[in-house]
Image (cartoon, rainbow, N blue to C red):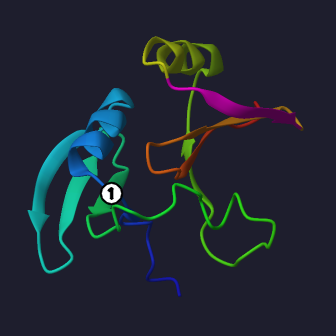
Amino acid sequence: MKQITRINHVGLRVRDLGIARAFYEKLGFEFLAGPMGPEPVAVVEHPSGVNINFILNASTDASPTNLLMDETAKHTGFTHIALEITDVETVKQQLNEHEISITETVEYAGATFFFVRDPDGNVIEFHKPAAS
């Protein structure tokens, strides 16, 4: 469908708005609105235009295990969001300053990507493409 122009937002189910908001603000996201609607939902957006909707209906007693990433069985579904970056070392330094642990780093064909987990176990990739 040629009418699709971009991803509008990513929806992440979270347990606690305050905790999720504080984490994503460390990554440069700004709180826009919420909670609102029947789910309810809160919205944060990065100055780059990346928009995340926090779905605020996660069970507080649910396991912190990420069903798609931590289980032996490989379930279908979205496994992570990838945020493109311009400078690997600066981003790693900023994550370290915010005490956000990098869980894995990969270099492949000139690209570098590394992963962190948010407080709900959602996986975030920081991706520096290979120089062209």
Q: For the stretch drawn in magenta, what is the main secondary structure? A: strand
Seen as rendered, the residue at the extreme right is 109
The image quadrant where one finds the C terminus is top right
* Camera sees residue 101: yes
Of 51 and 77, nearer the camera is: 77
Q: Quadrant of residue 76?
A: bottom right
Q: Residue at x 53, y 50 (%)?
A: 121
Q: Is residue 107 magenta?
A: yes
Measuring from the top left, give residue 25's x and y in whole percent.
29, 33
Measuring from the top left, give residue 52's x and y in whole percent.
34, 56
Measuring from the top left, give residue 78's x and y in whole percent.
60, 69
Q: Residue at x 73, y 64 (%)?
A: 71
Quick check: 30 above or below 33? Answer: above
Q: Residue at x 11, y 55 (%)?
A: 33
How many marks the image carries: the answer is 1
Apparent side of residue 109 relative to residue 22 in the rendered image (left or right): right
Amino acid type at mark 1: Arg
* Camera sees residue 132: no
Quick check: 17 above or below 9? Answer: above
Quick check: 32 above or below 61? Answer: above
Apparent side of residue 79 relative to residue 104 in the rendered image (left or right): left
Q: Residue at x 74, y 34 (%)?
A: 104
Measuring from the top left, give residue 87's x and y in whole percent.
59, 20
Local packing at callout 1 (Cα closer than 10 Å; few below 14, some 14-19, many 20+) is: many
Of 102 and 27, nearer the camera is: 102
Q: Is residue 48 magenta?
A: no
Residue carrying label 1: 15
Query: Which range is magenta?
Result: 100-108
Secondary structure category for the residue under label 1:
loop
Seen as rendered, the residue at the extreme front is 61
